[in-house]
Image: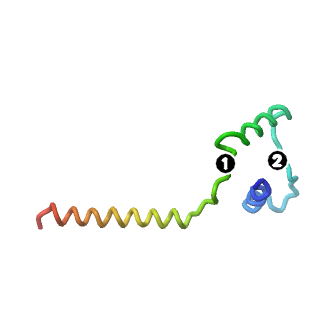
Amino acid sequence: TARMLRQLIHAVSPYRGCLMTHEFKTRLNENDQHLVDEYNNTGVNREERKPFRPWKMMMWLAICIVGLGVAARIIGTVYLPY
């Protein structure tokens, strides 16, 4: 997953033409960076997540909007006089 993250960052990076190292530069010393890496690999951060699906989110958003629109129409026709 770290390799995929590096590839993604490289793909969207505005510095694609520049020579970049594979390691990320950090302002932390080695001990602090080790502590941060250790924290990031424990607890909730350890869980591997499913990939983000934007089209699935858009589908559910459209379903919710249409559903609320239909509910508003039904409520409007039932409770409001012409």
* Colour mapping used in the image: rainbow
- In the displayed structure image, the side of residue 71 where residue 48 appears, left or right: right
Residue type (three-letter) at the residue carrying disc 2: Phe
Residue type (three-letter) at the residue carrying disc 1: Glu
Q: Residues within 10 Å of mark 2 (few under 14, many from 20)?
A: few
Q: Residue visible at 71% across and 40% down? A: 42
- Marks 1 and 2 in Cβ contact (< 8 Å): no
Q: Residue visible at 80% across and 57% down? A: 3
Outermost residue toward the left in this view: 81
Disc 1, SS: loop
**What numbered label is drawn on residue 47?**
1
Residue designated by label 2: 24
Q: Residue visible at 83% across and 44% down? A: 25
First in sequence, mark 1 or 2: give its number.
Answer: 2
Quadrant placement of the N terminus: bottom right
Quadrant placement of the C terminus: bottom left
Please provide percent x and percent y for residue 73.
25, 66
Please provide percent x and percent y for residue 63.
41, 66
CA gap between label 1 and label 2 equals: 22 Å
**What numbered label is drawn on residue 35?**
none
Dividing the picture into quarters, in which one does residue 76 lie? bottom left
Please provide percent x and percent y for residue 48.
68, 52
Q: Residues within 10 Å of mark 1 (few under 14, many from 20)?
A: few
Please provide percent x and percent y for residue 39.
72, 37
For residue 51, above or below residue 44: below
- In the displayed structure image, the side of residue 81 where residue 30 appears, left or right: right
